[in-house]
Image (cartoon, rainbow, N blue to C red):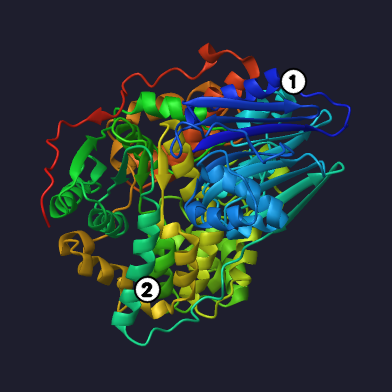
Amino acid sequence: MCGIVGIVGTDREYQVESADIHRMCETIVHRGPDDEGIYAQGRVGLGMRRLSIIDLSTGHQPIHNEDRSIWIVFNGEIYNFLELRPDLERRGHKFYTNTDTEAIVHLYEEYGASCVEKLRGMFAFAIWDDRQQRLLLARDRLGKKPLHYAFSQGRFLFGSEIKTLLAVAPELSTVSSEGLLDYFYFGYIQDRHSAFTEIQKLAPGHLLEYANGKVQCRKYWELPACGTYEPASEKECIDDLEQRLSEAVRIRMISDVPLGALLSGGVDSSTVVALMARESSRPVKTFSIGFPNEDFNEAGHARLVAQQFGTEHHELVIDADFGETLDKLTHMMEEPFADDSMVPTYCVCALTRKHVTVALAGDGGDEFFGGYDRYMVDLRRRLVPGMPEWAGDFFRKNIFPRLPAEMYGRRFLFNMSLASRDRYLDSIAYLRLDSRDRPLFSSDFLVSAETLPSPLETFRASLNGAPATDRLSRLQYLDVMTYLPFDILTKVDRMSMAASLEVRAPLLDHVLAEWATKLSPKWKIRSGQQKYILKKLAERLGVPREALYRPKQGFAVPLVHWFRNELKQDLLGVLLEPKTLQRGYFSPVAVRQLMDEHLKGRRDRSAELWLLLVFELWHRNFLETLATGDSSQRAPKITSMKTCQTLPVTPQAGTEQ
């Protein structure tokens, strides 16, 4: 696992300075604390920071082909490189390392840009072809590894993180109104934008070729048609799933460094741990987090699974004293990001990194096997007749704005006034500037926002263009195209890399993902049971039923309680400061009303308040530091908050199963 950077001069007379590449690399040392490599020749410079996983002794990047005409910097892991290598050697290619990276170089020599189609894994890479004077950028199919790019002052720049570009082109730091609009709606920024106007993201499953001053992007992978595969029996379905998931786990256990698993105690991670335990000759190292508040605490279920499979288990307890962690994360995060599970994700990654360098995780099960509760809510609401279109329009324009903010059922009525398609989109939106949440925003910001396209339009396009005929498959497709890469995978990548930990997700193996997409929806949700077939496989593998058949808790912090108690003063202190209220985005009166509504227990507004808090901390800890270049200008620490606390737990001893 690495972080990569690069510069290509648009003018062939341009000379790259290796010092610029080094400066870019310095911003992402956390992604690769073990090594730095730089290639700077003429108008081209490539750089990388390496977290050594495979071929520790000879895997130094950038890596080249036999005559040094092709160079690569690579971030990720290719799990089928050992299968690819013999064929490449038969074709006459000479390898000088044992890395997966070098296999990509020789694949490119054989197949050009289409080489990406032969790769199985997670990746973002850049190949410079000196003969053709062409740069190729590629990102994996589902978007596990990030890649950003921009033009600035006669240079094409790219890097794993936005801060790599800003290190040599601070003029790119103009904040994007479109990006902020995305954030207010969804709590993250879609890949069509970034937080900065001139910086773009390469989308998942896409290639970018830069030559002769021109950029060309194309999509090289698409999910297959949904729900087209119908197994003959439940046994056949479980057998097929077991074979595919077992293989996905096995190939992700290849590593030259210590390896473990993130174990939440839920269906997905427990199934992965069960398969790891079956594959491993030694006890698997597992890591989990817990909370003092039992409504959010899954630690007991994680311990139960750890005992069942004889893992060496480590546990962390997180309480409201996580201010230093949040301060650190909002300093590192280049974009505002409101998924509150980023805090426990970072904490468990930091704990895990003390013991191993690689960890497997259960991400992807909800999207591909129907695990989100919002799917069930949507399916139930479709049974309730909505308003006629004319009546819904009249209600939203004339009646809804007059309903008291504290009225129970107000948001539900708004949702039910929408067309069936838009109900789901409304349910996943935090703050809608177009109607529902307008009073929260300042009049000036609303005027500027009205000139921009609605962030919901790309979601509507994905939903309408889904290769599916049933409602569940359409919702799953939408989430795989949006929520999975823009939120879940962004969070996992940023938080794991902040801890210098590589996280691998077997359930997001693209071969398995294609199979799951084609699987009939009746195997995903049946008689109200979500992730039906995945739970059946987990049962077969011995995962305790107590861990499988229980209410879904998710991986979030108990903000609703903390904002009314432990964090009450800290929240007030940040959101009601004049500096915050004077930024011009929000109505100070509406912010106070939102807080009052939550603190008095009239409504749970923790999600919206968290979004506002993170947004303000991003301004202080990232934007203002960027503008001044002085880390002392960061936001004052939220002083009553500490950091994640390690719970002294006696590791579970390995046992024979």
Residue 342 in sight in this render: yes
Secondary structure under the numbered disc 1 in the rendered image: loop
Q: In the image, residue 129 lies at what x, y percent?
A: 75, 42
Residue 341 lies left or right of residue 355; in this view the side is right
Q: Badge 1 is on which residue?
A: 17
Of badges 2 and 1, the one in the foreground is 1
Image x and y of residue 359, in percent: 35, 43
Circle 2 — which element? loop
Compared across the picture, whether 355 is left or right of 308 comes to right
Circle 2 residue: 524
* Nearer to me, 17 or 567: 17
Q: Position of residue 324 (x, y in %)?
A: 37, 23
* Residue 68, image quadrant: top right
In the rendered image, the vertical position of residue 105 relative to residue 479, given as above or below: above
Q: Amino acid at mark 1?
A: Glu
Q: Are marks 2 and 1 in contact (CB under 8 Å)?
A: no
What residue appears at the point 54 percent right and 29 percent down from the top-left corner?
Answer: 49
